[in-house]
Image (cartoon, rainbow, N blue to C red):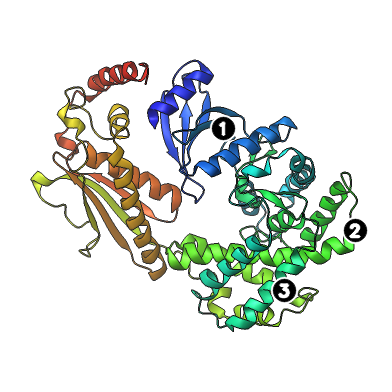
Amino acid sequence: MEKIFRRLFKQHFGKPPVSILEIAGDGSARQMFRLVGEEMETAVGVVGPDADENRAFLSFTKAFRSIDLPVPQIYGVDEKAGIYLEEDLGETTLFDAVTQARREDPGADFPAAVLPVYRRILELLPRFQVEGGKVIDYSLAYPRAAFDRQSILWDLNYFKYHFLKLAHIPFNEARLEKDFRRFATFLLGADTRHFLYRDFQSRNMMLRDGEPWFIDYQGGRRGALQYDVASLLYDPKVGMTEPVREELLDHYLANLEKLLPVDRDRFRQHFRGYVLVRIMQAMGAYGYRGFYERKPRFLQSVPQAVRNIERILETGFVSIELPELQAVFERICKTTSLRKAAPQALPGLTVHVGSFSFKGGYPEDGGGHGGGFVFDCRAIHNPGRYAEYAPLCGCDEPVVYFLEQQPEVEEFWGHVRGLVESHVGVWLTRGFASLSANFGCTGGQHRSVYFAERLAAFLRAHYPSVNVVLTHREESKWPANREQAEIAAAGAAAGAASKPE
């Protein structure tokens, strides 16, 4: 993987990167890395395990850039490996900007400072939908070419099985299925000839120099105009107020009318339906990630989603009869536990992450409760067997590079991450104070250190409320001449990277 990143980076910038660091992902199976060159050139490297998803993203990006829409430039692609290099749009999402604006103006119902950005986004959205829809190759849309009846029913059943059942909301199966079919027919009565971005929400818009740029449209397909504007204005993570929604919806419609005629009354009738289906899709995702996978950060958006549903109920629901679905929403709004900010990440969890040598026995219990994980890294190929790596440790770049060429490393990491993240989620919701995760290898210097460093970085990026304490028990035993050895090993690694694959 790293070898391919280096090759693609060198092909575009003329020189290989000096560092490759994993960055927080987007909740999907993709892995993302930031590559930095000698003169601070940067790029984002993506490892996408789904070839169809990769093809859709790359094709859509090329189409959007052909009509000057602000999406990242693709620097290089290795289709066989499922790896591509794209323009680095920075680290500030629209969600980050809203969060910061709330801190600076805590008394406001919704921060006025971000309204110009929202207006600009809603000026660009019709271009994605109408102009973009004319240049998109829908044969590559993933997983379906259109947000059709089957897609709608998938989303509705996702909500039923992953939210209603896991949150223990009662419903009549037969009556709810009947409502789902009637609801899908109503939704498909809208104009469905245009591009539907699918995940048009605050974490998928980057701000660079105050201007919005757009990412994560690989799930796009043909569909209704209402879906994406509903996704943005009813994003539970943002908590937009009703007057702001109305102002921004009018702004969107005014810009849409520059591209095609719009029956505003008919648009608004279907808009309410797409607000509901978008909320239901999001709640299904929150339920699956939060209740089933036990990742509590996904449950933090549920109370706002409930408030959004309550607002829809207060203002007349939708223009067709859906008695069982309406009853289900009323039951959700009456469920006290879903309306509160709980289950919430309770303060005080410390995760003790460490490396050690099995020669010195198991590590002491840093949390004082006798629980946690000990992972044996000795099945991983050992860089300590090679003279150039022997003086180094698992946090040195040449050793990291060596380990990440070993196919068993990613498989091992995937198991570790899944186990630890699941427990962190449970520990947070139950208010536990401590969890330990230790990695052992032969000398406590290479493999165990690498995985301890990687887990600590992952937890800090994904769980900012968690206190991570990182300890390398054998550090005092590592060789003193590591700096000189690292320079020599880096030269050897660079020489190896410059050879043809």
Tell me the kind of residue under disc 1. Asp
Residue count near mark 2 (Cα–Cα under 10 Å), binned few <14, some 14–19, many ≥20? few
Number of numbered discs: 3
**Left/right of residue 333 with respect to residue 452 in the rendered view:** right
- Which residue in the structure is indicated by mark 3? 182
Q: Say what amino acid the circle numbered 2 marks.
A: Asp
Tell me the residue that label 1 is attached to: 88
Q: In the figure, 284 relative to 360: above or below? A: below
> From the viewer's perspective, is residue 11 above or below residue 301?
above
Task: Count residues near mark 3 (Cα–Cα under 10 Å), then give few for <14, some for 14-19, many for 20+.
Answer: some
3D distance between C-alphas at marks 1 and 2: 39 Å
In the image, 441 versus 343, the foreground residue is 441
Q: Quick check: 77 above or below 442?
A: above
Q: Which image quarter holds the N terminus?
A: top left
The residue type indicated by label 3 comes to Arg
Dot placed on the residue nearer the N-terminal end, 3 or 1:
1
Q: Nearer the viewer, residue 211 or 186?
A: 186
Tell us which disc is closer to us: 1 or 2.
2
Q: Earlier in the sequence, mark 3 or mark 2?
A: 3
65 or 238: nearer the eye?
Answer: 65
User: What is the residue that sits farthest to the front in this orientation?
Assistant: 139
Q: Residue sitting at 32 percent across and 52 percent down? A: 415
Q: First in sequence, mark 1 or 2: give its number.
A: 1
Q: Position of residue 482 (x, y in %)?
A: 22, 25
The percent coordinates of residue 56 (x first, y second) are 60, 41
Residue at the spot of label 2: 263
Disc 3 and disc 1: Cα gap in Å?
Answer: 44 Å
Q: Position of 153 compared to 12: left or right?
A: right
